[in-house]
Amino acid sequence: MAKMAKKKKGNGEGTVYKTKSGFRGQIVVGIDDEGKPIRRSVTGKTVKEVNEKLTIIKNSIITGTYIAPNKITMCDLARLMIEDDLNLNYIKEATYYRHIETLKRIEKCPYFTTTPIQELSYAAIKDFLLSETRMSQSIINKVFTMIQKTLKEAVKRKIIIENPIADLKKPKSSQKREKVRALTKDEEVKLYKVLTTEDVNYSHQMLLSMLTGMRMGEINALNVEDIDLRFKTIAVNKTMARGLKGEAFVSKSAKTENGNRIVPISATVLPLIDEILLCTGEQHLFEQNGKPINTSQVNLQFQRVVEKYDIVDKKIRGKVSLHSLRHTFATRCIEAGMQPKVLQHILGHSDIKITLNTYCDAFESFQKENIAKTDEYFAGMGINFETAKTVKEVS
C-alpha cells in the first residue's frame, strides 16, 4: 500500500494528507479524559477545500460553538453540515433555508436533539419515520434523505462505526396523491376572460405563467431589466424564495441550474408585457407596498378565483392548483406541435425525460393525432388496404 504524503502546517493549524481520492485533513479539537488529543478529520478533492473545512472547525472552537464527537447529536451534525455547505458555497441561500426547514421538522422529536448520535437505534429512527407517513411524499423524502446523509457523514467522520439505518427503506406517504393537471381548453379560455375583464389581484402573474410556462417564483422575482423588448425575450436567472420566518426574498439564481434560461415573448404575450411594464414597481416587476410578492399569496388568490368564477370542471379528474398554469402552457405547446426538446428548454427542465414523463399523457394524445394525419397522407398516396381489398373483390 502506497504511503500517504503528509503536509504539515503550523502549530495547532492541523495536518493535510494526500490520499488516492484527494486530500484528508486532521485537526486537534480537544483532550480526552486520559489527556490524549481528540482529532477530527475532513476530506476534500483539493488542499484548498480541506483547508476551508479545517478553518470552519477552528472558528467553531474559537467561538465556543464546536461540539465534541462523543456528545454530538444527529441534529447538531446535520446543522453543522448545512452551515458548512453554505459557507463553502456548495448550496445557495434559498437551499440553505429549505434544509433548515427540514431540520426543524426533525428537531421536533426530542430524541434526536438529546440523544448522542452513537446511541441512536434502528427502532427509534424507524418509529419516527413511520410517524411521518401521514405527511406528503415530498416531506418524507426530504426528512429521510437528511437523516441518511447525516448518519453517513457520521460514519465518514468516524463518530460512529456504521449507519444504523443503512438498509432501511424509505417510507411511503399514506396520503392519497392527486396528480396536478392542466386546464382544458374551455377552462383556460374561461380563466383568461376572468383575468382580463375582472378586477383580480395578481392577474398579470397568473396570465404570464399560463402563457409562458414560467414558475410563479420566477415571475415574482423579475426586474425591468430582465425584459428585452428588442429581442422579445425574458431572462430567467433568479427566483422568489422564503426565509426562516416565512419572509419572501429574491434568490440570486433560478430554482435549478437549468432554470437559468431565456424565455421568448410570443406575439400573444407581448401586449401583456407592455401592460405590465406600464404599472411596474420600482424594484421588481411585481411588488406590493414596495415589498416582493411570494408564491403563497398568488396561490391563495388563484384558488379564490377558480372557486368564485366556477372555472374548474369537477367531472375531470386531477388537482387544479397554481402550478396547473405551467402545465397548461406545456400542454397547449404539445397540442400545437412543439418538439419536446424545445419545450424542455423553455420550461427549464434539466433532462428531456422530465419533460416527457411529466407530460406523457399530452404527448401520447398528440402522437395519436399525428398518426391519424399520417393515415390520411398514406391514403392520399393510394396506400389504403381497405381500398385495395374492395378493388380485389370487384375484380
Image (cartoon, grey):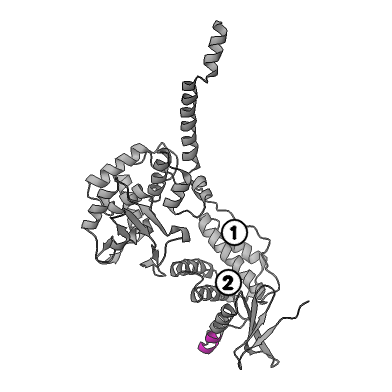
Q: Secondary structure at mark 2?
A: helix
Which is nearer the eye, 56 or 126?
A: 56
- Residue type highlighted by circle 1: Leu
In the rendered image, which quarter is residue 125 located in? Answer: bottom right
Q: Which callout, 1 or 2, points at the residue further toward the start of the chain?
A: 2
Q: Is residue 136 above or below residue 26?
A: above
Which is nearer the eye, 133 or 257?
A: 257
- Give the magenta range: 58-63
Residue 394 at x, y = what percent? 54, 6
* Distance between the alpha carbons at the discs numbered 1 and 2: 15 Å
Which residue position is annotated with label 1?
Answer: 130
Placement of the C terminus among the 4 image quadrants = top right
State the residue lying farthest toward the left.
278
State the residue lying farthest toward the right.
1
Which is nearer the eye, 333 or 40?
A: 333
Was residue 323 drawn as part of the magenta stretch in this picture? Answer: no
Which is nearer the eye, 116 or 92?
A: 92
Q: Residue at x 25, y 49 (%)?
A: 271
Q: Residue at x 57, y 77 (%)?
A: 49
Q: Along the horizontal axis of the image, is 157 left or right of 393?
A: right
| Crowd around label 1: few <14 · some 14–19 · many ≥20 (10 Å) | some
Residue 370 at x, y = what percent? 47, 32
| Magenta segment, prevailing SS (helix, strand or loop) | helix
Decide if residue 295 is in sight here. no
Q: Is residue 115 above or below residue 250?
A: below
Q: Residue at x 55, y 63 (%)?
A: 143
Residue 364 at x, y = what percent? 50, 37
- Residue type highlighted by circle 2: Phe
Which residue position is annotated with label 2?
Answer: 112
State the residue lying farthest toward the top.
395
Q: Along the horizontal axis of the image, is 367 left or right of 240?
A: right
| Crowd around label 2: few <14 · some 14–19 · many ≥20 (10 Å) | some
